[in-house]
Image (spheres, rainbow, N blue to C red):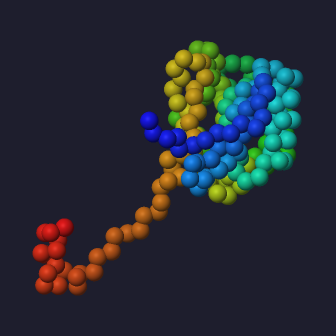
């Protein structure tokens, strides 16, 4: 059996978050990670926003909070449902503004939850400024739902390993060397 590439070491667990550190075995990459499951009411989510503010203030280095916030952020985050009111977005917006947290760009589906009538965007990946300065081009892929009414989110880490390739350079004078064709054939 192959070894794991990433290790997650949880440091805090409650009903709405699981927080810890993710690192590669080689320790080339390490970051704080918070898995989110926001409760269903605005009042119940107040503890989640408070806990996320606390984590943000303590987190050193890179941080990603990802999952089901169960909250909309913008008026475009719901389709075919009730109109989004300011009270629904207020706590989320204040958290984002106060902490300077950014949402990672997504690819795939526009909405992450459906009840077959209403579509909402309530699942997200949020990152701190250290993340944006280090890995701003990473994306979250919104996958097709399978056993849930939510679309799974996938951090597209493979983008990190792409290195800028340098162009192939060939000096024509090498081809003029008497043993050039012999070496090419041998290779």
Residue 16: percent from left, percent from top: 77, 27
> Measuring 73% from the left and 32% from the top, which residue is drawn there?
18
> Measuring 67% from the left and 32% from the top, which residue is drawn there?
67
> Measuring 73% from the left and 49% from the top, which residue is drawn there?
128
Q: In which quadrant of the rendered view does residue 13 lie?
A: top right
Residue 156: percent from left, percent from top: 54, 43
**Residue 139 visible in the snapshot:** yes
Is 108 on the left or on the right of 121, as rendered? left
Q: In which quadrant of the rendered view does residue 113 lie?
A: top right
- Quadrant in which the C terminus appears: bottom left
- Quadrant in which the N terminus appears: top left
> Measuring 52% from the left and 20% from the top, which residue is drawn there?
146
Residue 133: percent from left, percent from top: 67, 58
Q: Is residue 88 above or below residue 53?
A: above
Q: Is residue 75 above or below residue 62?
A: above
Front residue (pair 113, 48): 48
Q: In which quadrant of the rendered view does residue 39 lie?
A: top right
- Numbered-mark total: 0
**Residue 77 visible in the snapshot:** no
Residue lying furthest front: 1
Is 16 on the left or on the right of 122, as rendered? right
């Amino acid at each position: 059996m192959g070894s794991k590439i990433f290790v997650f070491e949880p440091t805090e667990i409650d009903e709405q978050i699981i927080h810890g550190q993710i690192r590669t075995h080689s320790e080339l990459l390490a970051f704080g990670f918070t898995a989110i499951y926001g409760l269903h009411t605005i009042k119940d989510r107040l503890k989640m926003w408070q806990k996320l503010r606390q984590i943000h203030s303590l987190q050193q280095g890179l941080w990603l909070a990802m999952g089901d916030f169960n909250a909309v952020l913008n008026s475009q985050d719901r389709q075919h449902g009730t109109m989004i009111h300011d009270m629904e977005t207020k706590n989320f917006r204040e958290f984002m503004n106060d902490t300077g947290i950014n949402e990672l760009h997504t690819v795939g589906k526009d909405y992450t939850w459906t009840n077959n009538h209403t579509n909402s965007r309530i699942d997200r990946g949020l990152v701190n400024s250290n993340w944006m300065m280090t890995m701003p081009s990473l994306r979250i892929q919104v996958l097709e739902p399978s056993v849930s009414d939510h679309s799974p989110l996938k951090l597209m880490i493979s983008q990190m390993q792409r290195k800028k390739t340098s162009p192939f350079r060939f000096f024509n004078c090498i081809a003029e060397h008497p043993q050039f064709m012999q070496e090419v054939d041998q290779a």
